[in-house]
Amino acid sequence: MIKNSILLLCLLSVAGCTTQPRMPATSAPVASATPEQQWVRRQQRLAAMRQWTLDGRVGLSIRQQSWSFGMSWVQQGNGEYRMDINNPLTGALMAHIQQQGSQVTLKAADGRLYQDTDAERLLQRQLKLRFPLKNMRYWVRAVPEPGKAVTSVRLDALGRPEQLVQDGWVITYSAYKGNDTFALPGRVQLERAAEQVKARVVAREWKTSF
C-alpha cells in the first residue's frame, strides 16, 4: 500500500513538471492584392521581358473582305522582330517580315524584297493587310502600349485584362495560358469599329525569356 502511494506521488510529480506544448503564434492575415494592384505588377513584369515567341493563327476581316493565315512572331526587345506569315492550310511561307532598328524588310513568297520605315504601311501596300503591328507587340501579351492613354480596362480577379480599349481599338482577351497574374492570353480579339476592322489571334504556343 505504501509502495503504491509512493508510485502515485512520483507519477503526479512527473506529470506536474511536464512542459505543455506551445501553440504557434497566429500571424496576422495578409491582405490579398487587389486586381488593380496585380494589374500594375503584371505590366511591370512583362515590360522586363527580353524576348518572346508566339506561334498561332490570325483571322482578319476588313469590311467585306477576310483573310486567315498562320503566324510565327519572334520579338527581341522593342526594336527588333521577325515574323513569318504562312498559308493556313499548307503552311507555305507567304511573307517574311523583319525589323531592325528603323528599317523594315518584307520578303514575299516569290523572293522579292520590299523595304520601308513603317511596318504597317509596308504590310498594307504589299499584302493588302490592315494590321496594327506597332501596338500588337504589347496588345498580344495583354498589356497596353506605353505612352498612350488607356480609355478603359476590365480586369479579372488576377489582374489580367478581359478587355482593353486603347488608341481606338477594343481588345478582348480569353483562354489565358496559365492560372497566375502573368499568364499570356490564348485568344485575342481586336476591333476598330470606325474602320470596320476585326482581327482574331489564337495562340498555339508561347515562349518567353526574361
Image (tube, grey):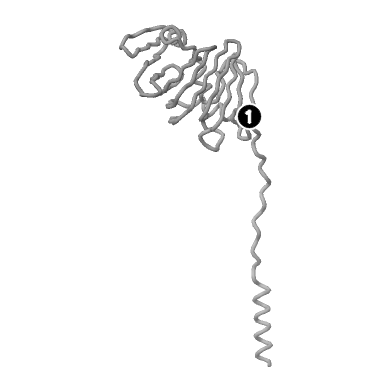
User: Exactly how many numbered labels are in the figure?
Assistant: 1
Image position of 205 (left or right of 135):
left
Say which of 170 and 19 sits in front. 170
- State which quarter of the image contains the C terminus: top left
Q: Quickly name the residue at label 1.
A: 155
At a point 64% along the width and 71% down the height, the residue shown is 18
Above or below for 12 versus 102: below
Left or right, 106 with respect to 19, comes to left
Identify the secondary structure beneath mark 1. strand
Identify which residue, 125 or 182, lies in the foreground: 125
Q: Position of residue 99 (x, y in %)?
A: 40, 14
Seen in the image, is 20 located left or right of residue 84? right
Q: Residue at x 60, y 10 (%)?
A: 194
User: Residue at image x 53%, y 33%?
Assistant: 176
Q: Position of residue 71 (x, y in %)?
A: 42, 22
Residue nearer the viewer, 50 or 116: 116
> Can you say which quadrant of the picture contains the N terminus?
bottom right
Q: Report x, y in % for residue 93.
A: 35, 19
Q: For the residue carrying disc 1, how many other residues have a C-alpha within 10 Å: few (<14), some (14-19), or many (20+)? A: some
Q: Residue at x 57, y 17 (%)?
A: 191
Quadrant hosting residue 173: top right
Q: Residue type at mark 1: give it.
A: Leu
- Name, please, the residue furthest toward the bottom: 1
Q: Residue furthest left?
A: 111
Q: Position of residue 87 (x, y in %)?
A: 38, 20
